[in-house]
Image (cartoon, rainbow, N blue to C red):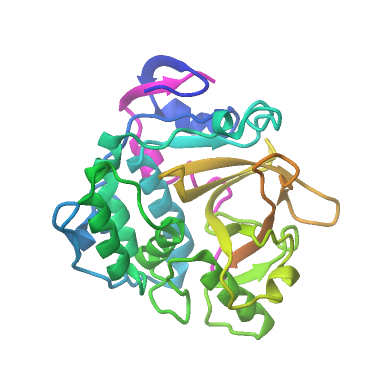
Amino acid sequence: MSSASGIGMKSSILPLAIALTAAVFSHAALASFDRLSADVLDVVPPSARVSGAPGEMTIQQGSCRTFSTAEVRRRIVDVAVQEWGFFGFHIVDQTNPDSADSGAPRSLRRPPRLGAAEAARVADSIAGYWTVTPDGSWILDRQNRAWNGPSGVAARWRDPWSAAFVSWVMCESGLGDSSRFRHAIAHHVYIDQAIRARDEGQPQTAFAAYDVGEAVIEPGDLLCTARRAAYRTLDERRLHLGASARTHCDIVVKVDEANERILAIGGNVRGSVRLKLLPAVRIPGEAMRPVDQSRISGGRTVFAHLKLRAASVEADALDNSPTIKALGGRDAVQPRV
């Protein structure tokens, strides 16, 4: 499997997983990883929520799991990490100046999309993400028509699925009630919910919105950017609450203070589930925050930190997730650092 940083020798990928605390990767990817058995990580695969082949796929299940509040934060991390593995451990390094070179064409700085065979392999998983959203049925119908077109199962998803991915992770982690988290096909829906939760004092809502640097970022939190409008602060979004906006949120899985970076997993990042390495900085009097990348061509400002109202877990929760622990003894192609 190729990567922008080259391919290294074949070896156990457990050292690679541990090396995430210190090493730097550029658009790296490893072999895909089968999901763990339920006795290791109790997760119902998204593919189990649908039936039928692409072109005839239908929703079979839309309900969410129930877990105690004490379990939610760790489950969010563990569920997201497993999906990252299933999609092939793709990594997008935004801390690498070479990969963020504003002088290079954007097409050369972005990781490639999935090939036809891989798109077919993950089709029912992506379809499963949509099942927890109110609009999932008609979106899947529309995608079936695309799959029945000239490109077949290799057809790209007609609708961006990043918010559906986040919604499914929250649903599978125990946030099923819409009063706690609004599952949606657009990120701005639950961003606005988190803003209102803090502004109006709604304690039942799972997330509360903060400007970056205002609160400590922890695994299980969400970091959100916007393209249209290009919000820089929550106050700018407050002017448009309820209005449509092109936004994107990633799930924090590790806060790496020693290397000044935040690791976060997002869906539909170049058509896949990918881990982002976000450069971070600590400003005196503030919590560590993502670096503003708006001055880089194609870069965006994290304008919203959605903080989960749940007990903390360790900052390196990624390293302790069942998926990473299960990598021991497995062989895979290791990208050169």
- Which image quadrant: the C terminus? top right
Residue drawn at the location 37% of the way across and 67% of the way down: 171
On the image, the x and y values in percent for residue 37 come to 23, 48
Residue 25 drawn above or below residue 321: above
- Main SS of the magenta segment? loop
Q: Nearer the viewer, residue 89 or 121?
A: 121
**Residue 45 in sight here:** no
The residue segment tinted magenta is 308-337
The answer to whether 201 appears left or right of 125 in the picture is right
Residue 8, by quadrant, is top left
The answer to whether 54 appears left or right of 234 in the picture is left
- Which image quadrant: the N terminus? top left
Residue 177, by quadrant, is bottom left
Residue drawn at the location 37% of the way across and 40% of the way down: 85
**Residue 98 in sight here:** yes
Residue 330, by quadrant, is top left
On the image, the x and y values in percent for residue 301 come to 69, 52
Q: Residue furthest top?
A: 9
Q: Nearer the viewer, residue 315 or 101?
A: 101
The answer to whether 310 appears left or right of 300 in the picture is left
Q: Is residue 141 magenta?
A: no
Residue drawn at the location 23% of the way across and 44% of the way down: 150
Q: Nearer the viewer, residue 24 or 71?
A: 24
Residue drawn at the location 55% of the way across and 32% of the way down: 107
On the image, the x and y values in percent for residue 35 come to 27, 45
Q: Residue furthest right?
A: 284
Residue 145 drawn above or below residue 294: below
